[in-house]
Image (cartoon, rainbow, N blue to C red):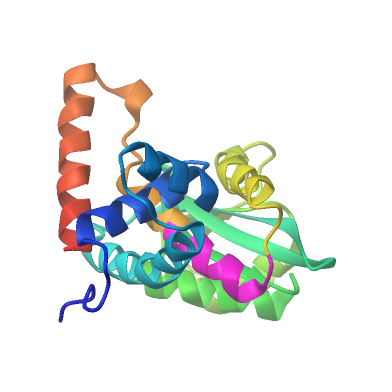
Amino acid sequence: MNIYKRHRFPPDIISYAVWLYHRFNLSHRDIEDLLAERGITVSREAIRLWCIKFGAIYTRRLKRKHRGYGDTFYIDEVFVKINGIQHYLWRAVDQDGEVVDVFLQARRDGATAKRFFKRLLRSNGGEPRKIVTDKLRSYGVAHRELIPEAIHSTELYENNRVEQSHEATQARERGMRKFKSIRQAQRFLDAHAAVHNLFNLGRHLVRAEHYRNLRISAFTEWGRAVA
């Protein structure tokens, strides 16, 4: 199926704009200017609609091709205000910094924690060996009822990995001047996580030549997702 049918601009321009939006802290106006500098005249509204439609399509394709996560999940939640109402953004990452899932909810009780854990099990295709959380009681409820065999650690500072992973999302939230709705926020967060995972190459951990090879592989996989 040709997902670009009836679109005036070629797929390369559309996919490039969507990649810029989810890879870097850029607004639709910023991307409009970047494309204009290359002689491509497109409105920010068109770019916004591309990000909504094609961001969701690319995300599904990238998730289907994902090679799998590690055996340890670091889980945390942060406050997010949407239209003045407080919500909770639940996030889980593995030991390599890969985002397993993000889930925006109105509560952080036991029922919500169980709902999030069920999503994690679907994303991972099975139970993790270990989970690391803070001392929120809701995690204990979900652990006992859904994955009692997994090790559950609540040691101080051990969960710093996932707490730091919130920073990129919070920077984007500020740049977008807050999320406008739960649906819009969840859609963006899913796409942002998928692109992050693809280009999460550990640049500071490998030699420059190895990093460049990894980056080439990431761009090749991105090319397949947007084809």
Is 65 in the magenta?
no
Q: Position of residue 83 (x, y in %)?
A: 79, 68
Per the picture, the main secondary structure of the magenta-coloured stretch is: helix
Total numbered labels placed on residues in the image: 0
Q: Is residue 70 visible?
A: no
Taking depth in this image into account, of 155 and 206 the one nearest to the observer is 206
Is 181 in the magenta?
yes
Q: Position of residue 1 (x, y in %)?
A: 15, 81
Taking depth in this image into account, of 7 and 201 the one nearest to the observer is 7
- 32 vs 203: above or below: below
Look at the image and give the residue range highlighted in magenta: 180-191
Query: Which residue occupies 35% across, 68% down?
Result: 54
Q: Is residue 193 visible?
A: yes
The C terminus, quarter of image = bottom left
Residue placed farthest to the right in the image? 84
Query: Which residue occupies 35% across, 31% down?
Result: 202
- 155 vs 59: above or below: above
Direction from residue 25 to residue 220 in the image, left or right: left
Direction from residue 180 to residue 219 in the image, left or right: left
Taking depth in this image into account, of 44 and 91 the one nearest to the observer is 44
Q: Quadrant of residue 113?
A: bottom right
Query: Which residue occupies 45% across, 50% down?
Result: 21
Query: Which residue occupies 75% across, 73% down?
Result: 107
- 24 vs 21: above or below: above
Q: Position of residue 211 (x, y in %)?
A: 23, 27
Direction from residue 211 to residue 19 in the image, left or right: right
Q: Position of residue 7 (x, y in %)?
A: 27, 72
